[in-house]
Image (spheres, rainbow, N blue to C red):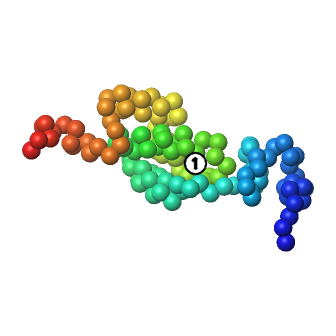
Amino acid sequence: MLCSRSDILRDISLSPTSLVSTSQNLVPDKDVAGWSQNHPLYAQDRALVDEILAQDKPNDHAITTAGRLFVRYNGFPGANDIKADLDACLVKWGMDHDGLNSRCKKIWFNGYRPGQIEEELSVGSGAN
């Protein structure tokens, strides 16, 4: 049985102006208690978070990965386990959000790009 928009609004106790309508889904435009979405990159990001959470002393890749994942999941209504584990990384590394941003900026300014192997950056001309 199909529900009308007003039935859905009544069921979730939201006003019509607080919803953004997509083709068949109604999505709140702000965080609503009990509302959670699945991020399309969740599985890949979960593996990355597990990888960086295991590091006691983070390398450039871990720092920049944490930085971009914080940006990706900031304000996202879901993936609370990823958000909590990213916060745990900062605690483990003795950093806060500002410190992470500063480190990320410094790393990028010094020429880091994802996919580079740190050893390759310091060895010869690469023509070997």
Q: Is residue 98 left or right of residue 33?
A: left
Q: Amino acid at mark 1?
A: Lys
Considering every residue shown, the one lying at the far bottom of the view is 1
Residue 35: tell me if it is visible.
Answer: no
Q: Pointer 1: residues within 10 angstroms few (<14), some, or many (20+)? A: some
Nearer to the camera, 98 or 70? 70
The image shows a total of numbered marks equal to 1
Nearer to the camera, 14 or 82? 14
Q: On screen, 51 above or below 61? A: below
Q: Residue at x 74, y 43 (%)?
A: 30
Q: Is residue 3 left or right of residue 69?
A: right
Q: Position of residue 104 (x, y in %)?
A: 42, 33
Q: Mark 1 falls on what kind of element?
A: helix
Q: Position of residue 103 (x, y in %)?
A: 41, 31
Q: Quadrant of the N terminus?
A: bottom right
Q: Residue at x 26, y 42 (%)?
A: 118
Q: On screen, 27 above or below 2? A: above
Q: Position of residue 38 (x, y in %)?
A: 62, 57
Q: Quadrant of the C terminus?
A: top left
Considering every residue shown, the one lying at the far left of the view is 128
Quarter assignment of residue 47 = bottom left
Q: Is residue 43 left or right of residue 15?
A: left
Q: Is residue 10 left or right of residue 85?
A: right
User: Mark 1 = which residue?
Assistant: 83
Residue 20: tell me if it is visible.
Answer: yes
Nearer to the camera, 119 or 25? 25
Quarter assignment of residue 125 = top left
Q: Residue at x 51, y 34 (%)?
A: 96
Q: Residue at x 49, y 53 (%)?
A: 45
Q: On screen, 74 above or below 78? A: above
